[in-house]
Image (cartoon, rainbow, N blue to C red):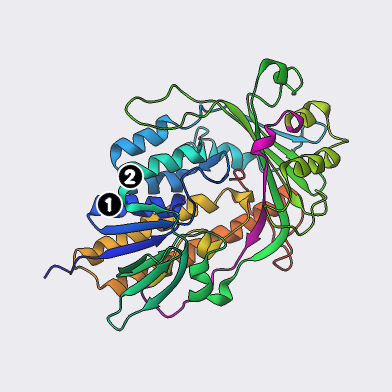
Amino acid sequence: MPAAPLHISIVGAGLGGLCLAQALNRRGIAFDVYERDAAPASRTQGYRIRIDHMGQQALEACLPAELFSLFKATSALPVQGVNLVDTQLEAVRGKWVDAWRRASGEAGSCEADDLSVNRQTLREILLEGIGDRVHFGKAYVRYREGDDGRVLTSFSDALSSVSDLLVAADGVNSMVRRRRLPAAMPADTGFVCVYGKTYPAPTVLERISDLLPSRTSIVFGDGLAVIIDPMRFRPQPAGYRLSKPEDYIYWAVVGAREKLGIGWEGGDALSQDELAARLERTTKEWHAGLRALFQEGDRSALAMQPVRTADVPSAWPGNAITMLGDAIHSMSPAGGLGANTALHDAHLLARQLGEAAAGRLPLRAAIGSYEAAMRGHGARAILASQRATEVLLGSRDSRHGRPEPVLAGQAPRALR
C-alpha cells in the first residue's frame, strides 16, 4: 500500500539544505526551504570550497544530470602541484605530501580529483529549478510537535508550516538544534579563520611571489597556516543565469586568536580595516612576496569566522526533527570535510526519505536509519578534522584533550 504523501520542511538554504531539496525534488517529495538571509547573496559565505570524492558522489546522486554537469563545468580550472612552504617561502618537508597527491588524482588513485568551486556559484546551481520552494527572509522561531506526529514550525514574519519532518540545516549556530539537542552545542576552539581573495591584476602579480598564482600553496607558520588556491574559471555555460566570478587567488589564514591578535569578538565585530591591520601586524616578518597577497587583497571581501567543533552526541530518541551538516557535526575547516560531510548527509537522508515515501519503510524508521549512519560518518569526519588541525598548526585545539597521532592518509586536503 503506498504511503501517504510526505512534506519536508528544511530550515537553512546553505549547501546541505539545498542539496537535500534537490534530491527530494528528484524523488517527487514535497518540501519547502526557509532561510533567514534576505537573499542568496546577502552575506559573505566564503569564496572557495573544495568538493572531494564523497561530495561529488552526493551531488551526482542528488542533482539532475544537467545540473551536475553544470557544477563540474563551473568549477575552477585544475592546478598542477602543491607548494609546501614556510612563511619565508622555503620548502617544508614531511607535511602530508603523500595524502595531498592521492587527493589530487595521482596515478594509482581510484578517486576523482577534488574540484574547487566558487561557493556562491554552487549555491546558485543548487537553487536552479526549485526557487519557488525556497523562501528567503524567513527566520526560524520555534517548532511544536503535534499529537499526530507532524511538526508545526513558526517563522519571524508569522509564517508557519506543517510538515512530516523538520530538517535543521541552519549551520553551526542552529537554533533548531538548540532546542532539539541543547547539550550538543559546539565549542569555540580558540582558533579563527580569516579569509579573502586577491585579484591577479598585472600590477598585483608584480608584487606577489611567482610561487602563488599557479599552484595550490600551504604555508606553515608558528601556530598559523595559510591555504592559497588560484581560482581561474572557464567561459560561462550558456542557458543559465549564474553570477560569473572573476578569476582570483583565494586565501585563508587559520590560527589561534592570540597569534592573529584577535580577541573574543564575534565574527562581525571587527571591521574589514581592523582585520587587515591585524594581518599586517601578524605577517610583518613574512616574505614580502607572500605578504603582498594579503596587502593587495580585496578589502571588501575580507571576513573572519571562529572555528567551532562538537562531538556528535550518542544516539538520541527519534522524533520528527532531524539535523544535517554543521547543525549537528560542526568541525574545524582544516580538513576540508565540513561541506562534503553535509552533502553526504543530504544524500543519505534523501535516500531514506525516498524509501519512506515509497511505503517501503516507516518514516520514523527511515529517520532513525539516517541518524545512525550520520552519527558514524560525522564522528569520523570530526576526528579527521582534529588531526588535520594538528598537522596544519602543530597543536591541538582547546576543545579536546591530548592530541592523537596523525595517521598516514588522514591528513587534510585543504581548508574549505
Q: Residue 239 appears at what percent x and percent y? A: 32, 27
Q: Residue 325 appears at what percent x and percent y? A: 49, 58
Q: Amino acid at mark 1?
A: Asn
Tell whether 371 sits left or right of 213: left
User: Of circles 2 and 1, which is in front?
Assistant: 1
Q: Amino acid at mark 2?
A: Leu
Q: Quadrant of the C terminus?
A: top right
Tell whether 185 sits left or right of 204: left
Query: Magenta span covers which residues?
Result: 294-320
- For residue 25, the mark is 1
Front position in the image: 43 or 360 = 43
Name the residue at 45% across, 54% down: 137
**Residue 414 location, quadrant:** top right
Q: Residue 111 appears at what percent x and percent y? A: 45, 41
**Residue 148 location, quadrant:** bottom left
Q: Indicate which disc, 2 or 1, sits on the residue closer to the N terminus.
A: 1
| SS state under label 2 | loop
Q: Give how far apart the Cα atoms at labels 2 and 1 are.
A: 9 Å
Q: Is residue 200 above or below residue 109?
A: above
Confirm whether the magenta stretch covers residue 314.
yes
Name the residue at 25% across, 58% down: 29
| SS state under label 1 | helix
Task: Name the residue beneath numbered marker 2.
Answer: 63
